[in-house]
């Protein structure tokens, strides 16, 4: 069962991101929100850079990302701007199938009685066909359509969504990290899928054929 795991630290609650629940409720781009049921509610508040921590690289997350065979994944490597890859989560159910890659950790203030922080960066990759098209997004939760990395992009409920024609990628980060993370996206499991690599800055539209 998915759980929120946290421990008491000398300077307050440390939010350890074993977060299938956090990812689903806070960071995940849900099918319902894209379809127009309304934006997701961030139960733990906005990401606060003062709470960010580097985190500890999880070798199992690296292994899971590189060996995942169900659909193409992208990441920003084992580390991004000092934040380590700390979690790999694969969640699937009725109408959704997605992978979360979580970078960095966070620590909430000591005065809080419950954990309340958001990690520096998360990347969500949705299986092809599991997310509505860009023009189906409810306008009140989405920005205008733009182009990033050669594909259609829209800011939806605070996350930048990239429609590749295959997988749909969402990047959740503060503004100072968002553009750099999008620019650094690259394929991670291309070798096991027998595909050619897509590197940082490359056009993402070839993912439509995979």
Image (cartoon, helix red, strand yellow):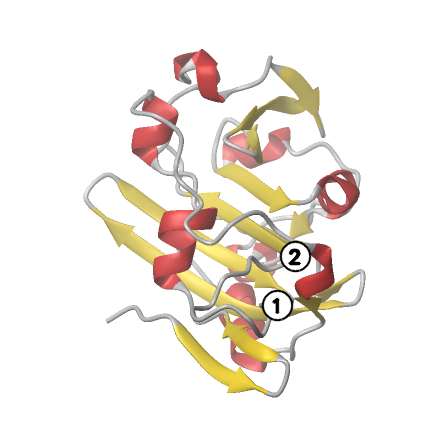
- Mark 2 lies on a secondary structure that is loop
Q: Is 106 drawn above or below residue 189 in the view shown?
A: below
What is the residue that sits farthest to the left in this orientation?
94
Q: Is 5 left, or right, of 210 in this rendering?
A: left
Q: Is 42 drawn above or below residue 130 in the view shown?
A: below
The location of residue 66, given as percent across then percent down, is 56, 66
Q: Is residue 98 visible?
A: no
Which numbered tag is attached to residue 65?
Answer: none
Q: Is 166 left, or right, of 56 in this rendering?
A: left
Q: Is 30 left, or right, of 80 in this rendering?
A: left
- Mark 1 lies on a secondary structure that is strand
- Quarter of the rendering containing residue 59: bottom right
- The residue carrying mark 1 is 106
Residue under the image location 55 percent in, 60 percent down: 117
- The residue carrying mark 2 is 120
Of 83 and 41, which appears nearest the observer? 41
The location of residue 147, given as percent across then percent down, is 68, 19
């Amino acid at each position: 069962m998915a759980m929120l795991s946290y421990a008491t630290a000398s300077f307050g609650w440390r939010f350890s991101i074993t977060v299938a629940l956090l990812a689903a409720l806070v960071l995940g781009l849900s099918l319902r929100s894209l379809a127009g049921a309304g934006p997701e509610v961030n139960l733990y508040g906005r990401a606060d850079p003062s709470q960010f921590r580097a985190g500890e690289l999880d070798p199992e997350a690296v292994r899971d990302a590189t060996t995942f065979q169900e659909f193409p994944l992208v990441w920003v490597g084992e580390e991004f701007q000092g934040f380590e890859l700390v979690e790999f989560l694969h969640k699937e159910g009725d109408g959704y199938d997605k992978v979360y890659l979580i970078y960095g950790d966070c620590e909430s203030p000591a005065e809080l009685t419950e954990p309340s922080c958001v990690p520096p960066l998360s990347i969500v990759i949705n299986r092809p066909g599991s997310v509505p098209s860009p023009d189906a997004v409810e306008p009140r939760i989405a920005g205008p359509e733009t182009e990033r990395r050669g594909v259609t992009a829209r800011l939806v409920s605070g996350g930048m969504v990239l429609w590749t024609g295959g997988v749909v990628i969402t990047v959740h980060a503060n503004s100072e990290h968002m553009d750099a993370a999008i620019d650094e996206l690259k394929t991670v499991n291309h070798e096991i899928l027998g595909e050619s690599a897509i590197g940082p800055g490359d056009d993402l539209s070839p993912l439509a054929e995979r």
